[in-house]
Amino acid sequence: MKNNSRNLALTAVFAALYAVLVLALAGISFQLIQLRIADALIPLSIVFGWPVIVGVTVGGAIANVASPMPSVLTDITFGSIANLIASLLAWRIGRLKLKGNAASEFIGCLTATAVITFIVGTYLALLTQMELWVWWLGIGIGSIISINILGYTLVQILKRVRLKPTAT
């Protein structure tokens, strides 16, 4: 990631937006069916690249400070790792152009959903001593809604609107 002011500003905006969305919607962000509307930002790595990857990683760490889970440190660490891997893979796969851009982008979103579901669902099952499949199902449902429906839709809208940088 180039260390220019635009990328730094975008990273800060995505980190803040992720944290604010999780905390403002804490009632649905920390449940068994974990509907994190903020996770809709993860696929935006396909459009913006590293600023989103770093932003959702840092934003996840900040947001998980408020986690009601038995080990906040575990939630901060592994939740951030999940966001990092999910957004990085969404970015890489979304740019492959497999059978067209939209197909690659959707596969990138599916991959991000699988990563979030597997990592977050697994560590939450270990923390709460509940059945693994219960957490995978709950996290998976929330991730499908936030990443595959909302996030993919955001990517498609942003591709059409495509803001052009202004000359300075």
Image (tube, helix red, strand yellow):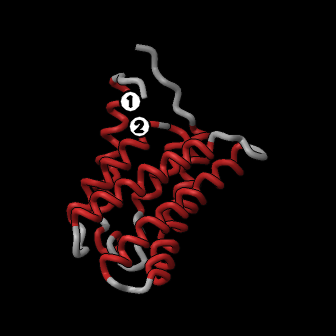
Image check: 119 left or right of 4? right
Q: Position of residue 57 (x, y in %)?
A: 36, 49
- The tag on residue 51 is 2
Q: Callout 2: few (<14), some (14-19), or many (20+) C-alpha neighbours within 10 Å?
A: many
The quadrant holding residue 83 is: bottom left
Q: Who's the residue at 22% across and 75% down the image?
A: 70
Tag 2 and tag 1, C-beta contact below 8 Å: yes
Observer-nearest residue: 78 or 140? 78
Query: What secondary structure is marked by label 1?
Result: helix
Q: Who's the residue at 31% across and 51% down the image?
A: 59
Amino acid found under the numbered disc labelled 1: Asn
Image check: 29 left or right of 116? left
Query: What secondary structure is marked by label 2?
Result: helix
- The tag on residue 42 is none
Q: Position of residue 45 (x, y in %)?
A: 50, 43
Quadrant in the picture for the C terminus: top left
Residue under circle 1? 7
Q: Position of residue 13 (x, y in %)?
A: 33, 41
Q: Who's the residue at 48% across and 49% down the image?
A: 87
Observer-nearest residue: 81 or 53? 81
Sequence order check, earlier mark of 2 and 1: 1
The quadrant holding residue 54 is: top left
Amino acid found under the numbered disc labelled 2: Pro
Image check: 133 left or right of 103? left
Q: Position of residue 157 (x, y in %)?
A: 58, 47
- Marks 2 and 1, Cα distance to the nearest angstrom? 6 Å
Q: Callout 1: few (<14), some (14-19), or many (20+) C-alpha neighbours within 10 Å?
A: some
* Residue 31, above or below 95: below
